Amino acid sequence: MKICIVTDAWRPQVNGVVVTLSNLIAAGEKLGHEFVVIGPDQFPTIAAPSYPEIRLALTTAKAVGELIRAHRPDHVHIATEGPLGVAASYWCPRNGELFTTSYHTRFPEYVEARWPIPAAWSYAALKKFHAGSAGLMVATRTLADDLTARGFQPPMLWPRGVDQDLFRPVDVPPPELEGLPRPFFLNCGRVAPEKNIEAFLELDLPGSKIVVGDGPSRALLQARFPETRFVGVKARQELAPYYSAADVFVFPSRTDTFGNVMIEALACGAPVAAFPVPGPIDVITDPRVGVLSEDLRAACLAALALSRDDCRAHAARYSWAESARIFIDNVVRARFAALARQATA
């Protein structure tokens, strides 16, 4: 099967959507499928408001449709709800193309955190966007139940994976961490308001706090919390030593739909401390690998006692090969159901 993925999040962006799609394509190709990507790198772009590192495509439905038609795919999957996703979702039904969609990011909560736009308004727009899809895919049952309760079509589950070769225990800690007092409490990801990193940095914890990543909040947080070691963005092949050095991986986000970084940290042996919210409650399903509590400080301290071997065993359950297989199966089922509905209409 040849699948055209339309996405507003693509390389060189560094985020969970890009990680997911890159691994889907790599694993899906090994299963014998072909993928083409229509991303913002193929169009003129402007910087996203408050996110200059994210570029938004300047294009039209006709231009996106011409690219889709030129690729002659067997199926179209629209991964994001940005300009490219909207353009594709307009063009496809008007040109006989079935498409599926996926819900990766809680945009309503992100928008509400920055501007006076109620989340309910954004959810209404997103529900309309995904209503035209032959099938909506999400990473977890918790998110599926939440969207269903909000009136979305019942989503199909599409779990995530982890690269066990890339994310594994590394014995030598990064030089940047030498001399810091133990234990190490580490966070990795985009340094932005919706990630709630302040909830971690404000904690009274022993040892050292370490933040891997960059984003619009970094300068402010680095000034407010000078005792925290900010090491900046690291390439994916550079992350394992940081995860491995962590005594606890702290995930303070309350808005992530999944949190790939939690699995990556677990694969390197680091237990997780997080709030009991969607994302963490779907990943930390075994109390031996993480502690979920509204008292994040207590969760961090309790996680110090957990077994790193148990963490690695838990992460081994997540496979990108299985994730890709489920994605393809979802596409086939969605197309079959949509064609059956058309035949009986």
Image (cartoon, rainbow, N blue to C red):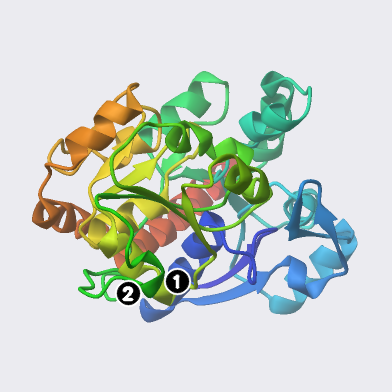
Q: Is residue 164 above or below residue 123?
A: below
Quarter occupied by the C terminus:
top right
* Residue closest to the eye, 254 or 213: 213
Q: Residue flagged by tag 2: what amino acid is it?
A: Leu
Residue 206 horizontal side relative to residue 200, left or right: left
Percent from the top left, x then y, of residue 94? 81, 51
* Whether residue 86 is situated above or below residue 196 in the rendered picture: below
Could you say where residue 20 lies in the image, as x and y percent from the top left?
48, 61
Other residues around mark 2 within 10 Å, as few (<14) / some (14–19) / many (≥20) = some
Q: Tell whether 325 sits left or right of 57.
A: left
Q: Is residue 327 visible?
A: yes
Q: Secondary structure at mark 1?
A: helix
Q: Secondary structure at mark 2?
A: loop
Please name whichever residue, 7 or 187, is drawn nearer the observer in this view of the structure. Answer: 187
Quarter of the figure with residue 42 = bottom right
* Residue with the mark numbered 1: 236
Tally of numbered tags: 2
Seen at 39% across and 54% down, the residue is 261
**Does the rendering let one see residue 292?**
no
Look at 70% across and 27% down and name the residue there: 112
Q: Which residue is mark 2?
A: 166
The residue drawn where x is 43% and y is 36% is 200
Q: Which mark identifies residue 147?
A: none
Nearer-N-terminus badge (1/2):
2
Question: Can you tell which quarter of the image residue 121 is in?
Answer: top right
Q: CA distance from mark 1 to mark 2?
A: 8 Å
Residue 332 locus on image (x, y percent): 45, 57
Tell me: residue 296, above or below residue 201: above
Check if mark 1's residue and mark 2's residue have beta carbons within 8 Å: yes
- Residue at position x 73%, y 20% from top? 118
Which amino acid lies under the numbered mark 1 shown in the image of this protein?
Answer: Arg
